[in-house]
Amino acid sequence: MEINDFSKHIPYFTRGEVVKGFGRGSKELGIPTANFPIEIVNDLPKDFPTGVYYGWGCVNDGQVYKMVMSIGWNPFYKNEQKSMETHIIHKFDEDFYGSTLSLIILGYIRPEKNFNSLDELVAAIKSDIAEAESQLDKADKIIHRENNYFKELK
Ligand code: ADP
Ligand code: RBF
Ligand code: MG
């Protein structure tokens, strides 16, 4: 059986408001994650695997940037609620709570894991960011950056 047969759902388009997350200080770690409301999480197809993904993201009618996202229960924190949190690979001057975040998810990096320390979690996320950066430089991924989905709010 294919455990990661997410391919039929890819590219996956999703859009929602940026809400307050768990407030665990991801930002202090240098990896802020924009969280989606539970309704958006519940809209995911039932067979969409939890794990770490990459793709493109855009805040309101702004520029399109590379992003990585975590979908799942964050085993390191033993969350009771499934979450979708996106780290946009760009340095923003200000927070954007309440804004609309549009995403195109293009690929899967790995399943969610537990870690022995916060340092190991952060190292894994940094390696995910590096992987996303290189995947999104490929021609078949770059084309999605220009998708009309990102122009609908302009
Ligand atoms: P929370 O627990 O509320 O999600 P975080 O520490 O994860 O708090 O910070 C997330 C917030 O940081 C986002 O909602 C957004 O407003 C802001 N932010 C700033 N830069 C980024 C970025 N590059 N990627 C994602 N969110 C960012
Ligand atoms: N949480 C986990 O418990 N396990 C993971 O494997 C995991 N991978 C992540 C990968 C990325 C790219 C991102 C942005 C987050 C990930 N998280 C994971 C969520 C992380 O625990 C959460 O963002 C914390 O708030 C970081 O302090
Ligand atoms: Mg967050």
Image (tube, rainbow, N blue to C red):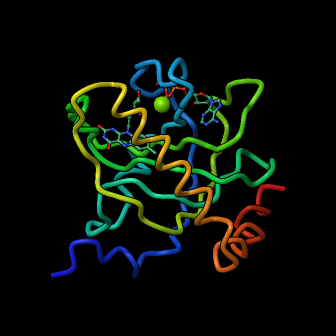
Figure check: 147 above or below 40: below
- Left or right of 86, for residue 41: left
Seen at 42% across and 64% down, the residue is 108
Name, please, the residue furthest toward the right: 154
- Left or right of 62, for residue 39: left
- Left or right of 151, for residue 105: left
Say which quarter of the image contains residue 49: bottom left
Seen at 63% across and 47% down, the residue is 101
Seen at 25% across and 32% down, the residue is 76
Figure check: 34 above or below 103: above
Seen at 22% across and 39% down, the residue is 114
The x, y position of residue 59, in whole percent, is 71, 45
Which image quadrant: the C terminus? Answer: bottom right
The x, y position of residue 52, in whole percent, is 40, 53
Task: Give the number of marks.
Answer: 0
Which image quadrant: the N terminus? Answer: bottom left
Examine the rendering and report whether any part of residue 137 can be seen. Answer: yes
Say which quarter of the image contains residue 96: top right
The x, y position of residue 94, in whole percent, is 74, 24
